[in-house]
Amino acid sequence: MIPLFKVAMSGTAPALVEKVLTSGFIGQGAKVDEFEAALATRIGNPKLATVNSATSGLHLALHLVTGGVGGEGGEVLTTPMTCSATNWPILANGLRLRWVDVDPANLNMDLDDLARKITPRTKAIIVVHWAGYPVDLRRLAEVLDQAEKVHGVRPVVIEDCAHAWGATFEGKQLGNHGNISVFSFQAIKHLTAGDGGLVVLPDKELARRARLLRWYGIDRETTARFSFLNDIPEFGFKFHMNDINASIGLANLDHVDEVLAKHRRNAAHFDAELADVPGLELTERAPDRESSFWIYTIKVDDRDGFMRRMEEAGIMASQVHERNDVYTTVREYAALLPGLDSVSTRMVSIPVGWWLTEDERGHIVSTIKAGW
Ligand SMILES: Cc1ncc(COP(=O)(O)O)c(C=O)c1O
């Protein structure tokens, strides 16, 4: 079976991990510092904090901007077409969520619907760069400018970049567009640390608080010795990364550009080969942004039939995530979402990753074309 996901582990990782394991120190230490310095250089933004997962990163980001109290009916506008990891941190922070529709062309948040739904109650907006294809961040900033004029509020934007390592908008890597950006280093992402995440912040004060609150609120950087005797002005969590995960991340950072380039090369091949297949529609490609193609999602008329044919041909295909608004835990937030309705049952992702051989890529294309 040609897999949809595979762990991209560098051959240098075991030796680096062994060194940490036998060093006598495996907590958050020198390797985390080294990983963060390398990530800051790579992204081009030093205002960041590693954490133990993107889910923790999203929880921390929401806590940073809402104070962790939910507020008086404080609301977060978000997309239902994502992993539940995007949305459950909203509930965990005691906030209400409000679904924004999905743009069927690119599977990201519909920014016109977003503009309609911002109110003075909106504390934050979470957007997801589906499959690694960036949301139109310029238009999003315009929507916020307009909301500020009308309502006098400018909600904080949290970009869920879990799929989007290395993706760019207007030539700049995600993590540089004035919002809070959260990346995932979970097992099957382009860049894995075994598990892990990264929060990139737009200003120094937020970055300072993020670094404090990821570890109980205890200052372990500016005081000479971190100690339980130092005051804790603001409580925090146990969301930090440790040196074991950081050393895996460091090893994989060396080859992640190669991994990403292979995803993109395979996607460009599919873009060319599948452009005119009847019954199948590709997603949008705009010239001002470059996707990371963590997955390659297409829209097909008969998804069950498509997935059956792929399975028979030894190719794994999946919808990857279920629209979150169907789950019982969020039933009170049900909303009319015509854009998502028009596309959610047609979405399916096919293997696009670094592991595909040219033969396998050809087999995927010919299997799809033979179906119609
Ligand atoms: C869109 C999205 N956000 C967040 C996450 C959570 O990432 P993590 O496993 O690092 O918590 C995932 C996981 O795949 C995801 O797909």
Image (cartoon, grey):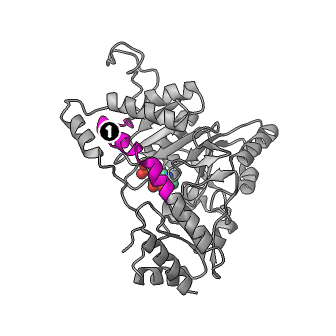
Q: Quadrant of the N terminus?
A: bottom left
* Number of numbered callouts drawn: 1
- The local secondary structure at tag 1 comes to helix
Residue for point 29% across, 39% down: 244
Whole-percent x, y for residue 22 in the image: 18, 34
Specify the quadrant of the image occupied by residue 232. top left
Q: Is residue 124 above or below residue 261?
A: above
Q: Is residue 194 above or below residue 319?
A: above
User: Is residue 42 in view from this perspective?
Assistant: yes
* Image position, residue 271 (x, y; %): 61, 68
Instruction: Name the side, left or right, on which 57 lies relative to 250.
Output: right
Residues shaded magenta: 238-262
Local crowd size for mark 1, using a 10 Å CA cut-off: few (<14), some (14–19), many (≥20): many
Residue receiving disc 1: 247
Residue at 46% across / 83% down in the picture? 308
Residue located at (29% from left, 45% from top): 13
Viewer can see residue 60? no
- Looking at the picture, how far across and down is residue 84, in whole percent? 48, 57
At x 49%, y 45%, the residue is: 183
Pick whichever, 106 or 293, lies toward us: 293
